[in-house]
Image (cartoon, grey):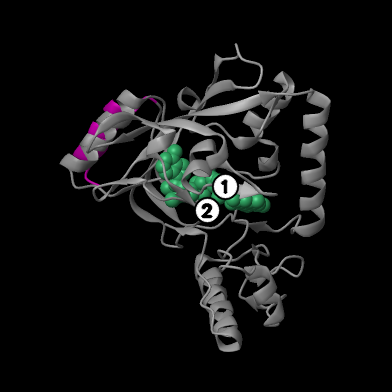
Amino acid sequence: MKKLVREQLSRLAENPIQWDCPLAPFTTFGIGGPAEALIVVESVKELSALLHCFADNSLNWRFLGKGSNLLVADSGFAGAVLLFGQGLAEITLVDDSEPGAIRVRVGAGCSLGKLLNWCVGKGYSGLEFVSGIPGSLGGAVVMNAGAWGGEIEAVVDSLTVFSMTSGEELLSREELEFDYRRWVNQKVGNEKRLVVSADIRLAREDAIDIQERCRKYLQQRKIRQPKVQKNAGSFFRNPPGDSAGRLIDASGCKGKCCGGAMVSPVHANFLVNTGDATADDVKQLMEMVVNQVYKDTGIILQPEVHFL
Ligand SMILES: Cc1cc2nc3c(=O)[nH]c(=O)nc-3n(C[C@H](O)[C@H](O)[C@H](O)COP(=O)(O)OP(=O)(O)OC[C@H]3O[C@@H](n4cnc5c(N)ncnc54)[C@H](O)[C@@H]3O)c2cc1C
């Protein structure tokens, strides 16, 4: 990145920019090389100024939530990586006048854990299914995150989004289309909209009952998922009518390794970093699993994890 561009970005960014910043610590896989610049954005105004600067200078950029559904290349990213700071992670009560329909505005940078704790404290139910999902609210919207029969799409009332094409927009529930682990109409033209905040609909319930449901879900995760080794959750999407974990297990891939990457012996749809895995190790393992399952069943597994 040219010195002049660096200077320009430094003037626009509210926080100090981290140059040549390793991305591994920003992902749950703990894998990935450096981004030329890592910028923690605090407002939509700042976001807009940065994106215009990237466009003017033909600079590549990508957006990162909590990095819990992401594999970053060993070579890192030639460009700027943005993530949201506290200014875009706030929780605000919008309306609690009706007993059954509480509306809360949540900044996209808010972690699901913090949001869920807040909900439990207030006695607001509806998000218990995210217990143990280590993402941000923005990432959960983009991925239509779900578990135990619940999905983010069921609680989203509207989204505030940003794109260079349309600026800041409010999208009502009727304008949003979700599918299995995907916000379908995220794009405006060729550009992906960024989620700035979401209004979500919750219900009032006894805090003890909400807490108990969260506890049960967490307990189930502890039994069914790898505890210690770093990972990005379910690596592959479930094919229609089946489970990727069952297919991988049936293909005998549990425990198989490529370098430091391993198919978890606990849950076959989790590829884990045993300590020193590289992104190449994970990709090789992914290809090995895809080939084996295809050979055995004719099904081509598709990754759920995004790549940077
Ligand atoms: C142990 C473990 C368990 C998990 N369990 C589940 C589970 O039960 N169910 C489930 O659905 N997922 C699960 N996941 C996967 C992951 O936590 C979710 O997909 C989560 O919603 C991703 O959020 P994130 O902020 O980490 O997104 P990231 O991984 O940072 O990003 C994912 C994608 O979303 C984009 N993105 C992120 N934020 C925004 C934004 N504000 N605007 C636009 N684009 C954005 C990124 O550019 C990227 O393309 C699990 C992961 C782990 C590690």
**Residues at marks 2 and 1 touching, judged by CB atoms closer than 8 Å:** yes
Image point (59%, 84%), residue name: 297
From the top left corner, tell me how far across and down residue 144 is, in percent: 52, 47
The magenta stretch spans residue 113: no
Query: Chief secondary structure of the magenta span?
Result: helix
* Image position of 265 with respect to 144: above or below: below
Q: Which region is colored magenta?
A: 1-14
* Image position of 116 with respect to 283: above or below: above
Tell me which numbered mark, 2 or 1, is placed earlier along the sequence: 1
Tell me: 248 left or right of 278.
right
* Image position of 35 with respect to 278: above or below: above
* Image position of 135 with respect to 116: above or below: below
Say what amino acid the circle numbered 2 marks. Arg
| Front residue of this view, candidates 19 and 233 | 233
**Residue 275 in view in this figure:** yes
Say what amino acid the circle numbered 1 marks. Ala
Disc tally is: 2
**Residue 65 in view in this figure:** no
Image point (51%, 65%), residue name: 303
Query: Residue 160 lies in what quarter of the image?
Result: top left
The C terminus lies in which quarter of the figure?
Answer: bottom left
Q: Which mark is residue 181?
A: 2
Badge 1 residue CB within 8 Å of ligand 1: yes
Tell me: 35 left or right of 255.
left
Where disc 1 sits, the SS reads: loop
Badge 2 residue CB within 8 Å of ligand 1: yes
Residue labelled with disc 1: 145
Tell me: 290 left or right of 128.
left
From the top left corner, tell me how far across and down residue 236 is, in percent: 56, 65
